[in-house]
Amino acid sequence: MRSLGLSALSLALTAVVIGNAFYQKKQFYPSVVYITKSNPSMAVIYIQFFVIVLMLGKLLRKIFLGTLRPAEFEHLMERFWYALTETCLAFTVFRDDFNPRFVALFTVLLFLKSFHWLAEERVDYMERSPVIGWLFHVRVASLLSVLGLLDYLMIVHAYESVALKGPTVQLVFGFEYAILITMVANTTVKYVLHAAELRADSPWENKAVFLLYTELVIGLIRVILYVLFVIIMAKIYALPMFVFRPMFFTMRNFKKALNDVIMSRRAIRNMNTLYPDATPEELAMSDNICIICREDMVSNSKKLPCGHIFHTTCLRSWFQRQQTCPTCRLNILRTPTNVTSSPPPPRPEGVNAPNINPNAGIQVPLPGFNMNNNNNNNNINIGQENPFTNLFAQNFGQAQAGATGANAGGNGTAGQVPPHVPPFVLPPFPFMAPYAIPPPPMPPNLNTLTDEELRALEGNERRHVEERLKLLQNVQLLLDAANSLMNQYSLVTARLPPIPAAATSSTVVPPSTAVSGAASTSSSTPTANSVSPEPSTSQAAFDPAAAKSATPKKDIITPVKSAQIDTNKPQSTLPEIEKDVRIEDLGSEEHADTVKHSQHNSTPTPSTSRQTSEVDPDDTELSEIRRRRLQKFQQQNDSVKTTTNE
Amino acid sequence: MAGSALRRLMAEYRQLTLNPPEGIVAGPISEDNFFEWEALIAGPEGTCFEGGVFPAKLVFPPDYPLSPPKMKFTCEMFHPNIFADGRVCISILHAPGDDPMGYELSAERWSPVQSVEKILLSVVSMLAEPNDESGANVDAAIMWRDNREEFNKIARRIVRKTLGLPS
Ligand SMILES: [Zn+2]
Ligand SMILES: [Zn+2]
C-alpha cells in the first residue's frame, strides 16, 4: 500500500515536471533540454526511473517466483544492502566514469543479482518442501534460462567493449556477470539434481556426492575469477576493495568444499575397506531401522566395529562430519576394526570379512551352525596373524582358567551346559599352542570388594577414574577370554557329528551378552547411564532405562559366563590393551539378540509397509494431522486455563 | 522421492502425531516447509512452570539429522538455560566439538540418534530441573540458586502471561 502511494507520488511529480517543461517550451526538444539542464527536474526523473525499475522487479517476481516467503525476503534484503555498499565502494574507484549510464548499468546489475539470489533460494527450498508442483518447475527453469542468457549477453557486451576501448568500467561488469553466470550454473546443477531426486522412485544415494563436487568445481572457478580480477584491477586502477568481502566468502566456501570432498573421500574409502557389509541375517533382525534416516535397511548397509548397522550412504555423510558411531559414539578412528584388539567388543561378530581369512581351512561350515561361529573363527585367524597374537594368547589362557574356575567353583554351572557340549577338551589345532602361557589376572570378585576398594572406585579424581578403568579393563579381558572359550566350544562342536540345528544355536550364546551386561551395571560410572539409547528406542521411549526394558530380550544367558565373574581373583599385572578406553564405550548397551535362528531370516519386517506410507503422505492426511494438532493444543490450553483460573 | 532430510522430518512428524508425548505438541508451521516447526510445551507438573504452555520454534538445517536444529522460545522466558532472546541452550542441541559453555559431556550431545521428540522432552526436563552451571541467562541462574522464591514468582508471572491472563 505504501509502495503504491510512493509510486503514485513519483508519477505525479514526473507528470508535473514534464508538464511544466512542455508548458514553458511548447516543443519536444527544447523541453528535453530544459529538463536535463534543471537539477530538480533531473532528480525527479531519476526517482521515476528507480520506481519503474522497482515496479518491473515486482512484475518479474510475480511472473517467475510468485509470492516470496518471509525468509526469502529477509535474505534478499540482507544481501541487497551488502551489495549496495559494495557498489558505492566501487563508485569511488570509477569516479571519472561517473555518469547516468554508469549508474543505470549498476542498477541493472543489482537488479539481476537480486534475481540470482532469489533463484538460488528457491532451488534450495526444493529440498524442504514436500509439495513441489509443475508451476514451480516451469518458473525456476525459465528464470534460470533467462538469467543465464542475460548474463551471457552482458559478458559478451563487456568483452567487446573492453576489446574495443581498452579497460574501462566494463571490466567490472564483465567480471560481475561472470561470477553471476557461475551462480546460475551452480543453481542449475542443484536444480537438476533435486528434480532428478524428486522423480526417482527410490532414495538417490549419490546425490550428496554430486552436490559436493559441483560445489568444489564452481568454488574453484570463482576463486580463480576473483584472483584474476584483483590482479588485473590492481594493475590498471587500484586495489578493488569492493570485492574483498565476497572474495573472502568465496575462498572460505571453497576451502570448506575442498575439506568436505577430502572427508567424503576418506569416509568412502573407510566404508569400502574397513567396515564389513551387514549380512542379510543381521539385516533381518527385528530392529533394522537405520537411526540416521529412520528408514528400513534392506541392503547396502555397513556394520561398525561396535556392531551398529547403518545405511552405507547415511554413514558416509555422517563420517564426513564426525568419525564416531552415531548410536554409541565409539570413536571409530581410535578403534581398530579387529575385534580381538578393540577395547569394547560387545558383539563378537564385529569382524565379518572372509577375505582376510587366510586359514579358511579351519572354518568348519556346518549346516544349521549360526554365523557367530564363523565370525569367531575369523577372529581367531586374525588374532593369529596380527601383532596382537600375544595378547590373544594370554586371553586364551585366561579363558581356560576361567572355565576351570567355573567348574571348580562347583556352583552347578557345569550341569546347566547343554549335554551335547563335551567337557572342556583341547582341540589339537595349531592356534591352541599358546596355552602354555600363564593365565593373566582376573578381575576382582565384585561381591567381595573391600570398602577400601569400593572407595577407590568412587569420586571424580584421576586415581578414581583410573581405578574404574582398571576394573573395566579386567572385565574387558574377561570378555575376550570368554569369547575365545566360545570359539573353542564352537570348534569342538563343529567336529562333532551333526546335531539338530536348534540345539546347536542355543549352545553358542555369545559370552559378551551376559558379561557386558554385568560390566555396564557393575561400573556405576556417571557416564554409563548417559549413553544414547539404541535405534529402536527412539520412537518408543526417551528414558534409556525404559528403553532397555522395552527392547525385546530373546537371549539365553548361559550361567557359565556370569559364574566366571564370581570366581575371579584379583591380580595386578595387567596387559595394556588400550590406554584410552572410554567409559561410555564400555557401557554401551547392546542388543541381546546376537543369537538368531536361521528361520527368522525370512520373517518380513513389520515396519516396511508403514515406512512407505510415511515417505509419501498425501495432502489431505497432512492437513488432518495439523488440524488435530491444533485441536489438541486448544484442548490443552483450555484445560490449563481453567485450572489456573481456579 | 524427497530428500533424506525431508523424509526423516516427515517420519518424525508422523511419529509425533501418532504417539504424542505427554504435554508436547509439535509440527511444521506450514505444510509446504518441513524445516520450520512450531512446538507447544506444557510446563512440567510440580514445578514453578506448571500450567504454562510455552510456544517455541524449531529451525532445522538442510543436513538434518547430521546437524542439530535450533530451538527458540517465542514467548517471554526466564530460565538459567534459556537466553534472553528465547534461544535454548542444552547439550542435546549442540554438535560435539562446539561447546559454548565448555562443560557438556559428549555423550549428551547431538547425534542422529536424537530426535525432535527427545529434544522436546529434554527441554521439559530442563524446565523442571535447570542447570545453573550453564550461563545462558546468568541472572536467572543466580536467582535460581540464591533466591528461589523470587524465581518462582517470575516463573508464575510468565506462566500467566503465556495463558493470556492478567499478571
Ligand atoms: Zn539410513
Ligand atoms: Zn555403535
Image (cartoon, coloured by chain):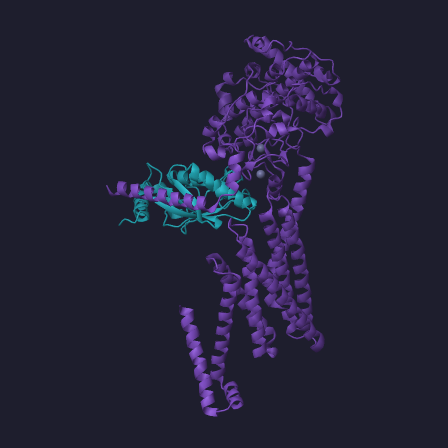
Chain colours: A purple, B cyan
From the viewer's perspective, is residue A181 above or below residue B68? below
Is residue A346 in sight in this rendering? Answer: no
- How many numbered circles are shown? 0
Across and down, in percent, residue B93 comes to 49, 43
Is residue A392 in sight in this rendering? Answer: yes
Across and down, in percent, residue A159 comes to 69, 71
Q: Quadrant of residue A242?
A: bottom right
From the viewer's perspective, is residue A548 above or below residue A92? above
Across and down, in percent, residue A571 comes to 60, 18
From the viewer's perspective, is residue A232 above or below residue B7? below
From the viewer's perspective, is residue A381 above or below residue B7? above
Left or right position of A419 against B153: right
Q: Quadrant of ligand 2?
A: top right
| Quadrant of the rendering where the N terminus of chain A is positioned | bottom left
Q: Quadrant of residue A345?
A: top right
Q: Which of the pair A497/A219 is nearer the observer?
A: A497
Across and down, in percent, residue A171 comes to 66, 71
Residue found farthest to the left: A646
| Quadrant of the rendering where the C terminus of chain A is positioned | top left
Q: Which of the pair A238/A482 is nearer the observer?
A: A482
Instruction: Tell me what residue is drawn at x 31 percent, y 49 percent.
Output: B161
